[in-house]
């Protein structure tokens, strides 16, 4: 057992035949542990030792990502499309190495609008998976890491979808006066 960036207080190794188990307890921080089984540590009934194993990495991730931030649209913006691009920032993917952060955006009217992965700088962007209806939508987002640790909701913002420039006007108000 080679300790990477995590601290392991104790571990147990058990098994027989072709199947062995390695258990960790009291892991003090998130991080990685590289595991190898040296040659000869497991012996069968005929006293034949095992071959050395390949090294594999175990990632410990118990920390949820921080709340994402919706940057665009801004609170109170009006968009004239049912599929506005929604973008923001969150914890970068690959921090720790191999971790993927997925941001899901929600509308108070339609529920989930879709998901997007963050890039190495933490930026994300999505076009809703369904058309947003005319009117006000409260948007929120949540970030989830590869270990399925979901962080807190983002701050709320309101975006107005206004598809018909004449919506809400009386027919007589639509007349063009010259």
Image (spheres, grey):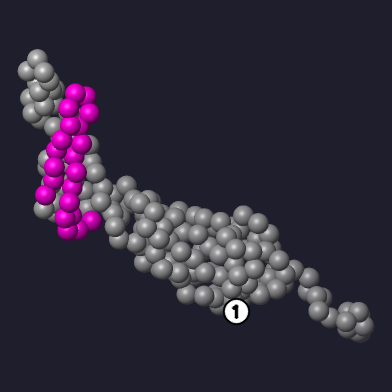
The residue that appears at 16% across and 55% down in the rendered structure is 26
The quarter of the picture where residue 28 lies is: bottom left
The quarter of the picture where residue 143 lies is: bottom left
Res 53 seen here = yes
54 on left or right of 41 = right
Q: Is residue 13 magenta?
A: yes
51 on left or right of 88 = left
Where's the C terminus, which quadrant?
A: bottom right
Relative image position of residue 117 (x, y in whole percent): 45, 53
Relative image position of residue 127 (x, y in whole percent): 59, 57
Q: Residue furthest top?
A: 46
Res 176 seen here = no
Task: Report the residue marked by disc 1.
Answer: 76
The residue that appears at 57% across and 60% down in the rendered structure is 112
Q: Is residue 6 magenta?
A: no
Residue stretch rendered in magenta on the structure: 10-30
151 on left or right of 105 = left
Task: Classify 10 Å Cα crowding around label 1: few (below 14), some (14-19), many (20 and above).
Answer: few
Quick check: 122 above or below 48?
below
Relative image position of residue 116 (x, y in whole percent): 49, 55
């Amino acid at each position: 057992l080679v300790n990477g960036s995590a601290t392991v207080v104790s571990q147990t190794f058990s098994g027989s035949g072709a199947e062995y188990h390695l258990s960790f307890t009291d892991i003090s921080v998130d991080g990685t542990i590289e595991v190898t089984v040296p040659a000869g540590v497991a012996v069968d009934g005929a006293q034949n030792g095992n071959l050395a194993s390949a090294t594999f990495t175990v990632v410990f991730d118990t920390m949820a990502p921080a709340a994402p931030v919706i940057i665009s649209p801004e609170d109170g913006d009006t968009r004239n499309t049912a599929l506005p691009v929604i973008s923001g920032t969150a914890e970068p993917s690959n921090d720790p190495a191999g971790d993927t952060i997925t941001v899901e955006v929600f509308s108070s009217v339609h529920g989930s609008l879709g998901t997007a992965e963050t890039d190495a700088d933490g930026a994300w962007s999505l076009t809703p998976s369904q058309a947003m209806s005319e009117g006000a939508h409260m948007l929120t987002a949540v970030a989830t890491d590869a270990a399925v640790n979901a962080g807190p909701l983002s701050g709320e913002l309101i975006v107005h979808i206004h598809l018909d420039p004449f919506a809400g006007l009386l027919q007589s108000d639509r007349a063009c006066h010259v």
